[in-house]
Image: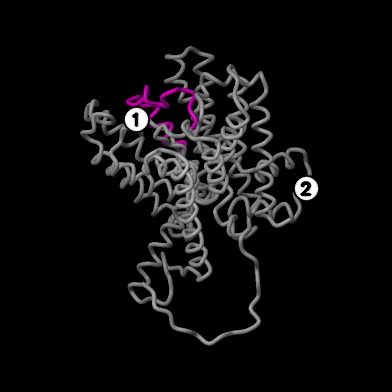
Amino acid sequence: MPPPLLLSVLYASAILLGAAALMMPVSHTAKISWSDAIFTATSAVTVTGLVVFDIGTKLTFFGQVVLTFLIQLGGLGLMTFAVLVLGALGLPIGLTGQIYLREDLNQNSMHRLMQLVGVILKAVLICEAIGAALLCLSFVPRLGFWNGLWQAVFHSVSAFNNAGFSTFSDGLVGYATDPVINLVIPALFILGGIGYSVLREVASGKGWKRYSLSTKIMLLGTGVLIPWSVIMFAVLEWSNPGTLGPYSVWGKLMISWFQGVTTRTAGFNTTDIGAMHDSTVLMFISLMLIGGGPASTAGGIKVTTFVVMILATIAFFRRQTQLNAFGRSIGFEAVLKVMALTAISTVLVFVATFLILITHDGTFLDIAFEVSSAFGTVGLSRGYTPELNGFGRAVIILVMFLGRVGPLTLGFFLATRSVPRLRYPKGEIHLG
Protein backbone atom coordinates (compact mmCIF):
# COMPACT_ATOMS: atom_id res chain seq x y z
CA MET A 1 0.00 0.00 0.00
CA PRO A 2 1.44 3.44 -0.91
CA PRO A 3 2.66 5.31 2.19
CA PRO A 4 0.23 8.28 1.91
CA LEU A 5 -2.72 5.90 1.63
CA LEU A 6 -1.58 3.73 4.52
CA LEU A 7 -0.95 6.72 6.78
CA SER A 8 -4.39 8.12 5.96
CA VAL A 9 -6.02 4.79 6.85
CA LEU A 10 -4.06 4.57 10.11
CA TYR A 11 -5.00 8.09 11.19
CA ALA A 12 -8.64 7.50 10.27
CA SER A 13 -8.64 4.26 12.27
CA ALA A 14 -7.12 6.01 15.29
CA ILE A 15 -9.82 8.69 15.09
CA LEU A 16 -12.64 6.12 14.98
CA LEU A 17 -11.18 4.15 17.89
CA GLY A 18 -10.72 7.36 19.86
CA ALA A 19 -14.31 8.40 19.15
CA ALA A 20 -15.54 4.99 20.33
CA ALA A 21 -13.56 5.40 23.58
CA LEU A 22 -15.06 8.87 24.13
CA MET A 23 -18.56 7.44 23.58
CA MET A 24 -18.15 5.02 26.48
CA PRO A 25 -20.33 6.02 29.48
CA VAL A 26 -17.24 6.19 31.69
CA SER A 27 -15.77 8.93 29.47
CA HIS A 28 -18.40 11.65 29.79
CA THR A 29 -20.59 13.27 32.44
CA ALA A 30 -23.36 14.28 30.00
CA LYS A 31 -24.51 12.50 26.88
CA ILE A 32 -22.58 13.32 23.70
CA SER A 33 -23.36 12.35 20.12
CA TRP A 34 -21.21 10.39 17.70
CA SER A 35 -20.72 13.66 15.81
CA ASP A 36 -19.31 15.24 18.99
CA ALA A 37 -17.05 12.26 19.63
CA ILE A 38 -15.70 12.01 16.07
CA PHE A 39 -15.07 15.77 15.89
CA THR A 40 -13.25 15.76 19.25
CA ALA A 41 -11.21 12.66 18.40
CA THR A 42 -10.22 14.14 15.04
CA SER A 43 -9.23 17.39 16.73
CA ALA A 44 -7.09 15.44 19.23
CA VAL A 45 -5.36 13.08 16.77
CA THR A 46 -4.64 15.96 14.41
CA VAL A 47 -3.46 18.01 17.45
CA THR A 48 -5.77 20.87 16.49
CA GLY A 49 -7.71 21.82 19.62
CA LEU A 50 -11.07 22.87 18.16
CA VAL A 51 -13.95 21.67 20.36
CA VAL A 52 -17.72 21.54 20.11
CA PHE A 53 -18.29 21.17 23.87
CA ASP A 54 -16.55 22.08 27.11
CA ILE A 55 -14.12 19.19 27.70
CA GLY A 56 -13.47 20.33 31.28
CA THR A 57 -17.06 19.75 32.36
CA LYS A 58 -18.38 17.16 29.89
CA LEU A 59 -15.48 14.71 30.01
CA THR A 60 -14.70 12.68 33.11
CA PHE A 61 -11.15 12.10 34.30
CA PHE A 62 -11.09 8.90 32.22
CA GLY A 63 -12.34 10.81 29.18
CA GLN A 64 -9.64 13.43 29.64
CA VAL A 65 -7.03 10.66 29.89
CA VAL A 66 -8.32 9.23 26.60
CA LEU A 67 -8.10 12.70 25.06
CA THR A 68 -4.53 13.11 26.36
CA PHE A 69 -3.53 9.76 24.85
CA LEU A 70 -5.00 10.76 21.47
CA ILE A 71 -3.12 14.08 21.60
CA GLN A 72 0.14 12.28 22.40
CA LEU A 73 -0.50 9.74 19.65
CA GLY A 74 -1.18 12.42 17.08
CA GLY A 75 1.76 14.55 18.18
CA LEU A 76 4.25 11.72 18.01
CA GLY A 77 2.89 10.43 14.73
CA LEU A 78 1.37 7.00 14.38
CA MET A 79 4.38 5.44 12.70
CA THR A 80 6.74 6.88 15.31
CA PHE A 81 4.49 5.47 18.03
CA ALA A 82 4.41 2.09 16.28
CA VAL A 83 8.22 2.06 15.96
CA LEU A 84 8.60 2.84 19.66
CA VAL A 85 6.21 0.01 20.60
CA LEU A 86 7.95 -2.48 18.31
CA GLY A 87 11.32 -1.39 19.64
CA ALA A 88 10.13 -1.90 23.22
CA LEU A 89 8.95 -5.40 22.29
CA GLY A 90 12.28 -6.16 20.57
CA LEU A 91 10.67 -6.64 17.16
CA PRO A 92 12.40 -5.57 13.91
CA ILE A 93 11.08 -2.57 11.99
CA GLY A 94 12.00 -3.66 8.48
CA LEU A 95 12.62 -1.63 5.34
CA THR A 96 8.91 -1.19 4.58
CA GLY A 97 8.26 0.14 8.06
CA GLN A 98 11.10 2.64 7.67
CA ILE A 99 9.64 3.83 4.37
CA TYR A 100 6.29 4.51 6.05
CA LEU A 101 8.08 6.17 8.96
CA ARG A 102 9.99 8.43 6.57
CA GLU A 103 6.71 9.49 4.98
CA ASP A 104 5.07 10.15 8.36
CA LEU A 105 8.02 12.28 9.54
CA ASN A 106 8.19 14.14 6.21
CA GLN A 107 11.84 13.21 5.63
CA ASN A 108 13.58 12.99 2.25
CA SER A 109 15.76 9.99 3.09
CA MET A 110 16.09 7.17 5.60
CA HIS A 111 19.53 8.31 6.72
CA ARG A 112 19.63 8.36 10.54
CA LEU A 113 15.87 7.85 10.62
CA MET A 114 15.93 5.58 13.67
CA GLN A 115 18.23 8.05 15.42
CA LEU A 116 15.58 10.71 14.83
CA VAL A 117 12.99 8.47 16.52
CA GLY A 118 15.25 8.29 19.57
CA VAL A 119 15.53 12.08 19.59
CA ILE A 120 11.73 12.35 19.42
CA LEU A 121 11.25 10.03 22.38
CA LYS A 122 13.82 11.88 24.51
CA ALA A 123 12.43 15.29 23.58
CA VAL A 124 8.87 14.26 24.39
CA LEU A 125 9.67 12.67 27.75
CA ILE A 126 12.07 15.36 28.96
CA CYS A 127 10.11 18.40 27.79
CA GLU A 128 6.71 17.17 28.95
CA ALA A 129 8.05 16.05 32.35
CA ILE A 130 9.85 19.34 33.01
CA GLY A 131 6.88 21.30 31.70
CA ALA A 132 4.43 19.49 33.98
CA ALA A 133 6.69 20.02 37.01
CA LEU A 134 6.95 23.76 36.35
CA LEU A 135 3.23 24.16 35.62
CA CYS A 136 2.50 22.65 39.04
CA LEU A 137 3.89 25.88 40.50
CA SER A 138 0.84 27.72 39.15
CA PHE A 139 -1.87 25.07 39.12
CA VAL A 140 -1.34 23.29 42.47
CA PRO A 141 -1.68 26.39 44.72
CA ARG A 142 -4.94 27.36 42.98
CA LEU A 143 -6.54 23.98 42.34
CA GLY A 144 -5.18 21.69 45.04
CA PHE A 145 -2.52 18.99 44.72
CA TRP A 146 -4.19 16.21 42.72
CA ASN A 147 -6.30 18.39 40.45
CA GLY A 148 -3.42 20.81 39.98
CA LEU A 149 -1.05 17.95 39.17
CA TRP A 150 -3.43 16.56 36.55
CA GLN A 151 -3.98 19.99 34.99
CA ALA A 152 -0.21 20.45 34.80
CA VAL A 153 0.26 17.09 33.05
CA PHE A 154 -2.66 17.66 30.66
CA HIS A 155 -1.57 21.16 29.65
CA SER A 156 2.07 20.10 29.33
CA VAL A 157 1.15 17.31 26.89
CA SER A 158 -1.26 19.60 25.05
CA ALA A 159 1.32 22.39 24.80
CA PHE A 160 4.31 20.33 23.64
CA ASN A 161 2.17 18.61 21.01
CA ASN A 162 0.82 22.00 19.88
CA ALA A 163 -2.73 20.77 20.48
CA GLY A 164 -4.17 23.81 22.26
CA PHE A 165 -6.66 21.82 24.33
CA SER A 166 -7.48 23.25 27.75
CA THR A 167 -9.80 21.95 30.43
CA PHE A 168 -10.69 25.52 31.42
CA SER A 169 -13.82 26.97 29.81
CA ASP A 170 -12.12 30.26 28.90
CA GLY A 171 -8.78 28.72 27.96
CA LEU A 172 -5.89 30.29 29.85
CA VAL A 173 -7.48 33.73 30.17
CA GLY A 174 -7.47 33.35 33.95
CA TYR A 175 -3.67 32.99 33.81
CA ALA A 176 -3.09 35.86 31.35
CA THR A 177 -0.46 37.58 33.50
CA ASP A 178 0.90 34.50 35.28
CA PRO A 179 4.69 34.48 34.64
CA VAL A 180 4.97 30.67 34.86
CA ILE A 181 2.22 30.11 32.28
CA ASN A 182 3.67 32.80 29.99
CA LEU A 183 7.10 31.17 30.06
CA VAL A 184 6.47 27.42 30.27
CA ILE A 185 3.57 26.99 27.83
CA PRO A 186 5.26 28.99 25.00
CA ALA A 187 8.56 27.20 25.61
CA LEU A 188 6.81 23.85 25.25
CA PHE A 189 4.96 24.59 22.02
CA ILE A 190 7.94 26.36 20.45
CA LEU A 191 10.13 23.31 21.13
CA GLY A 192 7.42 20.96 19.88
CA GLY A 193 6.68 23.04 16.79
CA ILE A 194 10.19 23.84 15.62
CA GLY A 195 10.82 20.28 14.43
CA TYR A 196 12.65 17.28 15.85
CA SER A 197 15.37 17.46 13.18
CA VAL A 198 16.14 21.03 14.24
CA LEU A 199 16.19 20.04 17.91
CA ARG A 200 18.61 17.21 17.12
CA GLU A 201 21.04 19.49 15.30
CA VAL A 202 20.85 22.29 17.86
CA ALA A 203 21.33 19.84 20.75
CA SER A 204 24.39 18.35 19.01
CA GLY A 205 26.23 21.63 19.58
CA LYS A 206 28.02 21.52 16.23
CA GLY A 207 27.46 25.20 15.49
CA TRP A 208 25.62 27.29 12.92
CA LYS A 209 28.04 26.64 10.06
CA ARG A 210 27.49 22.88 10.28
CA TYR A 211 23.71 23.04 10.47
CA SER A 212 21.79 21.65 7.51
CA LEU A 213 20.10 24.03 5.08
CA SER A 214 16.66 23.04 6.37
CA THR A 215 17.62 23.84 9.97
CA LYS A 216 19.06 27.22 9.02
CA ILE A 217 15.94 28.16 7.06
CA MET A 218 13.69 27.01 9.91
CA LEU A 219 15.61 28.99 12.53
CA LEU A 220 15.71 32.06 10.30
CA GLY A 221 11.97 31.92 9.59
CA THR A 222 11.11 31.37 13.25
CA GLY A 223 13.43 34.19 14.31
CA VAL A 224 11.58 36.58 12.01
CA LEU A 225 7.98 35.39 12.48
CA ILE A 226 7.94 35.38 16.30
CA PRO A 227 9.00 39.04 16.78
CA TRP A 228 6.75 40.09 13.90
CA SER A 229 3.64 38.42 15.33
CA VAL A 230 4.28 39.61 18.90
CA ILE A 231 4.94 43.24 17.91
CA MET A 232 2.04 43.40 15.46
CA PHE A 233 -0.42 41.95 17.98
CA ALA A 234 0.65 44.55 20.55
CA VAL A 235 0.37 47.39 18.02
CA LEU A 236 -3.03 46.33 16.67
CA GLU A 237 -4.67 45.44 20.00
CA TRP A 238 -3.00 47.86 22.45
CA SER A 239 -6.13 49.99 23.03
CA ASN A 240 -8.78 47.36 22.29
CA PRO A 241 -11.05 47.20 25.39
CA GLY A 242 -11.94 43.59 24.56
CA THR A 243 -8.34 42.30 24.57
CA LEU A 244 -5.34 44.32 25.83
CA GLY A 245 -7.11 47.54 26.84
CA PRO A 246 -7.88 46.77 30.52
CA TYR A 247 -4.35 45.56 31.39
CA SER A 248 -1.26 47.42 32.55
CA VAL A 249 1.70 47.92 30.24
CA TRP A 250 3.41 44.81 31.66
CA GLY A 251 0.20 42.79 31.29
CA LYS A 252 -0.22 43.94 27.69
CA LEU A 253 3.33 42.89 26.88
CA MET A 254 2.87 39.45 28.47
CA ILE A 255 -0.38 38.78 26.61
CA SER A 256 1.13 40.04 23.34
CA TRP A 257 4.07 37.69 23.80
CA PHE A 258 1.89 34.69 24.54
CA GLN A 259 -0.71 35.34 21.85
CA GLY A 260 1.88 36.24 19.25
CA VAL A 261 3.86 33.01 19.57
CA THR A 262 0.85 30.70 20.00
CA THR A 263 -0.87 31.75 16.78
CA ARG A 264 1.05 29.77 14.19
CA THR A 265 0.29 26.36 15.65
CA ALA A 266 -0.36 26.01 19.39
CA GLY A 267 -3.89 27.37 19.76
CA PHE A 268 -3.88 28.47 23.41
CA ASN A 269 -5.38 31.84 24.28
CA THR A 270 -4.97 34.26 27.17
CA THR A 271 -7.37 36.82 25.71
CA ASP A 272 -10.75 36.84 23.96
CA ILE A 273 -10.08 35.86 20.34
CA GLY A 274 -13.59 36.86 19.34
CA ALA A 275 -13.00 40.45 20.48
CA MET A 276 -9.95 41.08 18.27
CA HIS A 277 -9.96 43.70 15.53
CA ASP A 278 -10.55 42.48 11.98
CA SER A 279 -6.99 43.47 11.04
CA THR A 280 -5.60 41.22 13.79
CA VAL A 281 -7.86 38.38 12.70
CA LEU A 282 -6.52 38.63 9.15
CA MET A 283 -2.94 38.60 10.44
CA PHE A 284 -3.72 35.53 12.56
CA ILE A 285 -5.16 33.73 9.53
CA SER A 286 -1.92 34.26 7.60
CA LEU A 287 0.19 33.04 10.53
CA MET A 288 -1.98 29.94 11.04
CA LEU A 289 -1.63 29.02 7.38
CA ILE A 290 2.18 29.24 7.63
CA GLY A 291 2.33 26.95 10.69
CA GLY A 292 5.47 25.48 12.25
CA GLY A 293 8.32 23.23 11.20
CA PRO A 294 8.54 19.94 9.27
CA ALA A 295 8.76 16.72 11.32
CA SER A 296 7.14 18.48 14.26
CA THR A 297 3.81 18.58 16.06
CA ALA A 298 2.83 21.69 14.10
CA GLY A 299 0.58 22.09 11.06
CA GLY A 300 0.27 24.58 8.20
CA ILE A 301 2.31 24.69 5.01
CA LYS A 302 5.41 24.92 7.29
CA VAL A 303 7.89 27.75 7.79
CA THR A 304 10.46 26.21 5.44
CA THR A 305 7.89 26.11 2.63
CA PHE A 306 7.02 29.76 3.22
CA VAL A 307 10.67 30.86 3.26
CA VAL A 308 11.53 28.92 0.07
CA MET A 309 8.49 30.49 -1.62
CA ILE A 310 9.77 33.96 -0.67
CA LEU A 311 13.29 33.10 -1.85
CA ALA A 312 11.95 31.79 -5.17
CA THR A 313 9.97 35.00 -5.68
CA ILE A 314 13.05 37.12 -4.97
CA ALA A 315 15.14 34.96 -7.31
CA PHE A 316 12.58 35.47 -10.10
CA PHE A 317 12.71 39.25 -9.85
CA ARG A 318 16.50 39.15 -9.74
CA ARG A 319 16.53 37.04 -12.92
CA GLN A 320 18.43 34.26 -11.16
CA THR A 321 18.49 30.86 -12.84
CA GLN A 322 19.33 29.03 -9.62
CA LEU A 323 17.84 29.29 -6.14
CA ASN A 324 20.47 29.63 -3.41
CA ALA A 325 20.43 30.03 0.38
CA PHE A 326 23.26 29.95 2.93
CA GLY A 327 25.79 28.79 0.34
CA ARG A 328 23.62 25.90 -0.85
CA SER A 329 21.37 25.53 -3.89
CA ILE A 330 17.74 24.49 -3.67
CA GLY A 331 16.69 22.01 -6.33
CA PHE A 332 13.98 22.57 -8.90
CA GLU A 333 11.96 19.64 -7.52
CA ALA A 334 11.87 21.29 -4.09
CA VAL A 335 10.56 24.50 -5.64
CA LEU A 336 7.87 22.56 -7.53
CA LYS A 337 6.86 20.86 -4.28
CA VAL A 338 6.57 24.25 -2.59
CA MET A 339 4.37 25.52 -5.42
CA ALA A 340 2.17 22.41 -5.31
CA LEU A 341 1.86 22.51 -1.52
CA THR A 342 0.96 26.20 -1.49
CA ALA A 343 -1.54 25.83 -4.34
CA ILE A 344 -3.31 22.80 -2.84
CA SER A 345 -3.44 24.40 0.60
CA THR A 346 -4.88 27.64 -0.77
CA VAL A 347 -7.53 25.84 -2.82
CA LEU A 348 -8.45 23.59 0.14
CA VAL A 349 -8.94 26.55 2.50
CA PHE A 350 -10.94 28.55 -0.04
CA VAL A 351 -13.19 25.62 -0.98
CA ALA A 352 -13.85 24.72 2.67
CA THR A 353 -14.63 28.35 3.51
CA PHE A 354 -16.98 28.59 0.53
CA LEU A 355 -18.83 25.38 1.47
CA ILE A 356 -19.41 26.54 5.04
CA LEU A 357 -20.42 30.05 3.94
CA ILE A 358 -23.20 28.74 1.70
CA THR A 359 -24.58 26.44 4.41
CA HIS A 360 -24.22 28.70 7.48
CA ASP A 361 -25.14 32.23 8.52
CA GLY A 362 -21.80 33.24 10.03
CA THR A 363 -19.62 36.13 8.92
CA PHE A 364 -16.82 35.60 6.44
CA LEU A 365 -14.03 36.37 8.91
CA ASP A 366 -15.38 34.00 11.57
CA ILE A 367 -15.70 31.11 9.12
CA ALA A 368 -12.40 31.79 7.35
CA PHE A 369 -10.72 31.94 10.77
CA GLU A 370 -12.17 28.56 11.82
CA VAL A 371 -11.17 26.91 8.53
CA SER A 372 -7.63 28.33 8.68
CA SER A 373 -7.33 27.20 12.29
CA ALA A 374 -8.45 23.71 11.32
CA PHE A 375 -6.07 23.50 8.36
CA GLY A 376 -3.11 24.75 10.38
CA THR A 377 -4.13 22.38 13.22
CA VAL A 378 -3.99 25.44 15.48
CA GLY A 379 -7.23 25.31 17.46
CA LEU A 380 -7.82 29.03 17.99
CA SER A 381 -11.49 29.87 17.63
CA ARG A 382 -13.72 32.92 17.57
CA GLY A 383 -16.46 30.85 19.16
CA TYR A 384 -18.05 29.68 15.92
CA THR A 385 -17.17 25.97 16.10
CA PRO A 386 -20.17 24.99 18.30
CA GLU A 387 -22.46 26.70 15.74
CA LEU A 388 -21.50 24.29 12.96
CA ASN A 389 -24.17 21.93 11.67
CA GLY A 390 -23.48 18.35 10.62
CA PHE A 391 -22.20 19.34 7.17
CA GLY A 392 -20.00 22.08 8.60
CA ARG A 393 -18.50 19.67 11.11
CA ALA A 394 -17.75 17.19 8.32
CA VAL A 395 -15.95 19.89 6.34
CA ILE A 396 -13.87 20.97 9.34
CA ILE A 397 -13.06 17.33 10.17
CA LEU A 398 -11.79 16.78 6.62
CA VAL A 399 -9.73 19.99 6.75
CA MET A 400 -8.18 19.01 10.10
CA PHE A 401 -7.42 15.53 8.76
CA LEU A 402 -5.73 16.82 5.60
CA GLY A 403 -3.89 19.44 7.62
CA ARG A 404 -2.37 16.68 9.76
CA VAL A 405 -1.55 14.02 7.15
CA GLY A 406 -0.36 16.71 4.74
CA PRO A 407 -2.11 18.60 1.93
CA LEU A 408 0.04 16.79 -0.64
CA THR A 409 -1.77 13.60 0.39
CA LEU A 410 -4.82 15.06 -1.35
CA GLY A 411 -2.67 15.57 -4.44
CA PHE A 412 -1.57 11.94 -4.23
CA PHE A 413 -5.18 10.75 -4.42
CA LEU A 414 -6.03 13.12 -7.28
CA ALA A 415 -2.91 12.60 -9.40
CA THR A 416 -1.46 9.68 -11.30
CA ARG A 417 2.23 9.12 -11.98
CA SER A 418 3.14 9.04 -15.65
CA VAL A 419 6.45 8.92 -17.50
CA PRO A 420 6.51 11.08 -20.65
CA ARG A 421 7.36 9.16 -23.82
CA LEU A 422 7.67 12.23 -25.99
CA ARG A 423 9.51 15.51 -25.59
CA TYR A 424 7.72 18.48 -27.14
CA PRO A 425 9.25 21.75 -28.37
CA LYS A 426 9.10 24.60 -25.88
CA GLY A 427 6.08 26.87 -26.23
CA GLU A 428 5.59 30.45 -25.08
CA ILE A 429 2.99 31.44 -22.51
CA HIS A 430 2.21 34.89 -21.17
CA LEU A 431 2.02 35.04 -17.36
CA GLY A 432 1.18 37.77 -14.90
Residue 74 lies in the magenta stretch = no
Residue sitting at the far bottom = 425
Q: In the picture provided, is 114 more to the left or to the right than 166?
A: right
Q: In the picture provided, is 365 more to the left or to the right than 130?
A: left
Q: Nearer the viewer, residue 375 or 331?
A: 375
> Image height check: is 212 above or below 39?
below
Locate residue 381: give its quadrant.
Answer: top left
Q: Residues within 10 Å of mark 2 (few under 14, many from 20)?
A: few
Q: Nearer the viewer, residue 211 or 180?
A: 180
| Residue drawn where x is 60% and y is 55% of the image | 409
Residue 169 lies in the magenta stretch = yes
- Quadrant housing the C terminus: bottom left
Q: Nearer the viewer, residue 222 or 336?
A: 336
> Image height check: is 218 above or below 63?
below
Where is residue 162? Give x, y as percent: 49, 38
Q: Which residue is mark 1?
A: 272
Q: Which residue is mark 2?
A: 92
Disc ID at residue 186:
none
Query: Three-letter amino acid code at disc 1?
Result: Asp
| Residue drawn where x is 40% and y is 42% of the image | 369
Where is residue 319? Give x, y as percent: 35, 77
Q: CA distance from mark 1 to mark 2?
A: 49 Å
> Image height check: is 193 above or below 68?
below
User: Which element type, helix, strand or loop, lies under badge 2?
Assistant: loop
Magenta stretch, residue numbers: 165-189
Q: In the picture provided, is 277 more to the left or to the right than 5?
A: left
